[in-house]
Amino acid sequence: MAKRDDETEGIEKSRDQYGEEEQNGDIKRETWMETKKLWRIVGPAIFARISTYSIFVITQAFAGHLGELELAAIAIVQNVIIGFSIGLFLGMASALQTLCGQAFGAKKYDMLGVYMQRSWIVLFLFAILLLPVYLFASPILKFFGQPEDVAKLSGTVAFWTIPTHFVFALYFPLSRFLQCQLKNRVVALSSGVALVVHIFVCWLFVYGLKLGPIGTMATINVSWCLNVLILFTYATCGGCPLTWTGFSIEAFTRLWEFAKLSASSGIMLCLENWYYKILIMMTGNLKDTKIAVDSLSICMSINGLEMMIPLAFFAGTGVRVANELGAGNGRGARFAMIISVTESLIIGIVFSMLVVFLHDQIGWIFSSSDTIIKAVNDLSILLAFTILLNSIQPVLSGVAVGSGWQSFVAYINLGCYYFIGLPLGFVMGWIFKYGVKGIWAGMIFGGTGIQTLILIFIVMRCDWEKEDFKTDLRFQSSAVAALQEAAEAYLVGLFEDTNLCAIHAKRVTIMPKDIQLARRIRGERA
C-alpha cells in the first residue's frame, strides 16, 4: 500500500512539477516549460528509437560485407518484410497513445494496464494473421518483380525472423504503456542494452562463427527478445505498481471497440510506412536491379535512422496532446503541437544540410562497392528533401494520435500516397525514364508533400476546445458504462453468490443508488 502511495506521489509530483501553463504568462516562459515537458519524453524516445533501429542498420552493415546478393536479400527482408509488420504493429499500438495518454491526463491510472493487455491480445492475433507473409516471402517477392536469386535468399532469411515478428506484438504496447506514464528512461536503457548485445552477437555470428546471411539475421531475434524481457520484467514486477495491478479479465472486455481504434491507428501509419517499402519494391523492375535496390536501401536506412528523431517527436506530441486534452486543457494541446512541430523542423533542417555536405561519403558505411557508393551519391539530394519533409509530417500525425483522429487521417494518407504519389512516381520512373530518381521524387513530392500541407491546414483550423469536450465525453461514457457493469455485478454477487462484483469493485464504489440501478437493469432483462 505504501508503495502505491509513493507511486501516486511520484506521478503527481512529475505532473505538477512543470504545471499547466499560465493563460496570460510570458510566451518565452511557456515555451521553455513546454519544451522541458516535451523533451522529457522525446529525449529518451530518440535514444530508444535510434538504438532499436540501429539493430537493423548494424545488421545491414554486416551483411554489406558478405556480398551484393546477401546485402540485397537482407535489405529487402528488413525494409519490406519486417518493415511491413513493424508498420502494422507500430500503428496499432499507437491506439495506446490515445487511450493511455488521455487516461493518464485524466488520472485514470488503473486503466493503463488494462489497455496494454487489450493491445497485447489484439496485436498477437494480428501477428498470427500476418504469419503467411514470412512463410511465403519468396513467391510474394517474385510476384512483385524481384530477381529469383534475391527472392529465394530473402525467403530463407525471412523465415528465421519469425520470432522477432511475434516479439513486436509485446514490445510496442509495452513501450507505449511506459511512455505514457513518463517512464521513458526505462525504455531507453533497455534499448541501449539490447544494442550493445546486438553488436557483439553480430560480430560473433558473422566473423567468429561465419554463419552467413541466416546467422546475420538471427542476431535480431536475440536482441529484440532481450529488449522485451527487460521491459516486461520492469512493468510487471514492481516497476509500475499504480498502473499495473496484475493480469485482469477486464482486458477481454470491449475488445472489438479497442480493435477498431487499433485498426484505425494501424491503417493510418501503415499506409505511410508501407509507402516507402513499395518504393523499394518498384525498383525491382529497373535496369541493374541489385545496384538500384542496394543504393535505395542504403538511403532508406539513413533516412530511417534520422526518422527516429521525428518519430520520437511523434510519440512525444501524441502523449503531450493526449495529456492536455485528458486534463481539459485544449489551449495547452495546441501549444504543445506548435512547439513540437517547430523544434522537429529545426532538427530536420540541420540533418538535411549534413546529407548535402557529406553526399559523397555516406555510402561507404554500408558497402565497399564503388558502384553502389556512386549510386548513393546520386540519390543524396532526394534523401535530403525526404529528411526535411519527414521532420514535419510525423509530428502532425502525433497530433492526430493524441486527439483520436486516426480514421480521418487514414483517408488522407490513402489519397495522397496511393492515388497521387504512387502514380506520379510510376510516370516519372518509367514513362519519363528517370529511373529510381524519378520514382522517389514523384512519391516524395506528390505523396508526402501534399499530405503534409493538408495536415498543416487541418491542425491550424482545429477547434481545440471542441476536442477537449470530445475527450470529456469519452471518459464520461466510460464511467457510466463502468458504473452500470459494477452495479449489475454487485447485484449478481448478492443474489447468485458469484464474485463478479470483485472485478469491478476496484473501479467504482458501489452506492445504494447503484443497487437500485442494478435491480432496474435486472428487471428489464427479465
Image (cartoon, grey):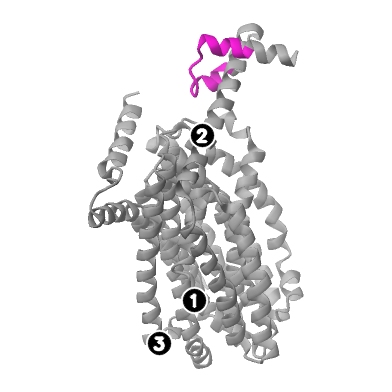
Q: Which mark is residue 361?
A: 3
Whole-number angstrom distance, CA of label 1 to CA of label 2? 39 Å
For badge 3, the amino acid type reads: Gln
Q: Quadrant of residue 15?
A: top left
Whole-number angstrom distance, CA of label 1 to CA of label 3? 18 Å
- Identify the residue at image location x=42%, y=83%: 362
- Number of numbered markers: 3
Q: Quadrant of residue 474?
A: top right
Tell me if residue 283 is in the magenta stretch: no
Query: Mark 1 or mark 2, which has the lower sequence index?
Result: 1
Place of residue 379 in the rendered image (x, y in percent of width and height, measured from the top left) = 51, 86
Whole-number angstrom distance, CA of label 3 to CA of label 2? 53 Å
Q: Which stretch appears magenta?
A: 501-518
Residue for badge 2: 475
Q: Does 289 sit left or right of 6 as displayed?
A: right
Residue for badge 1: 386
Local secondary structure at mark 2: helix
Q: Nearer the viewer, residue 459 or 398?
A: 459
Q: Nearer the viewer, residue 395 or 170?
A: 395
Say if 427 sits above or below 481 in the image: below
Say if 482 sits above or below 446 in the image: above
